[in-house]
Amino acid sequence: MAFDREDFDAFWQDWLEINREAQRLGDWGIMADFYEPDATYGYTYSAEDQYMNVGREEIRAGVLGLEMLGFQGWIYPYQAVIFDDRSGQAFGLWRQLTTFNAPDGQPYEIKGLGGSWFQYSGKRSWSWQRDMFDVGVATTAMIEVLRDGNNSPQLDERMRLIAEGNMPGHSTLEDMHAPLWPVPPVLA
């Protein structure tokens, strides 16, 4: 099956716009309508901590809701996208930085590569998404925000939930509700 590049390009522009609106509002739940009803969304925190949501509403409440607590005032501008019109897979590279400044006058930034691997449905929605980012670098940035007293009530709530072990969607690789690798392995 081939995917129409012009259709994808128009969808991608709409995706960028809803991302900007979600960042402006500090509410990423509005992005959930860009996923298929049975879509999956996951990423890896560590070898023993995987994250996965299954279904649009779980994505809305989980990765776009609870997982984004404390990231109000953060933006994720995409730097590039690569799209394979044969498979419908896309890979977008993004940065993670704040709209507020650290004591040195510069925005805080998670200084590493961030990326999302997507499966385009061909129906102006995502069938699945997998994110990649450096958790150690992200943790360092969050510690800087906390150290400088620039934490928000939402970030405090997130830290409380993490400390209590009450962040749903986390599991081991063996207990995930969808595969980390959503495509068959390439045979050599």
Image (spheres, rainbow, N blue to C red):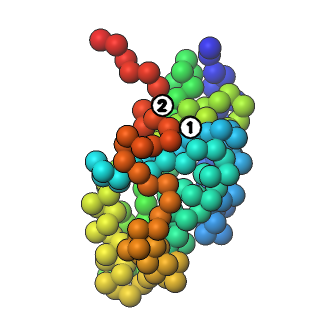
Residue 121, position as x, y percentages in the image: 65, 30
Q: Residue at x 55, y 18 (%)?
A: 86
The reply to whether residue 98 is visible in this rendering is no
Q: How far across and down, in percent of the image, does residue 175 sit? A: 42, 43
> Which quarter of the picture shows residue 104?
bottom left
The residue lying at 57 percent from left, 25 percent from top is 88
Does residue 36 appear to the left or right of 50 in the view shown?
right
* Residue farthest bottom in this picture: 149
The three-letter code of the residue at mark 1 reads Trp
For disc 1, the marked residue is 128
In this rendered view, identify the residue nearer to me: 50 or 78: 50
Q: CA distance from mark 2 to mark 1?
A: 8 Å
Q: Which residue is rendered at x = 62% and y = 14% of the image?
A: 1
Residue 174: % across, % down = 37, 40
Q: Nearer the viewer, residue 158 or 109?
A: 158
Q: Are marks 2 and 1 in contact (CB under 8 Å)?
A: yes
Query: As rendered, which of 1 and 65 lies closer to the eye?
Result: 65
**2 or 1: tag closer to the N-terminus:** 1
Q: Give the quadrant of residue 23.
A: bottom right
Q: Position of residue 157 (x, y in %)?
A: 49, 78
As drawn, the label of residue 182 is 2
Q: Nearer the viewer, residue 83 or 72?
A: 72
Q: Residue furthest front?
A: 175
Q: Is residue 23 above or below residue 17?
A: below
Amino acid on which disc 2 is placed = Pro
Classify mark 2: helix, strand or loop. loop
Disc 1 on helix, strand or loop? Answer: strand
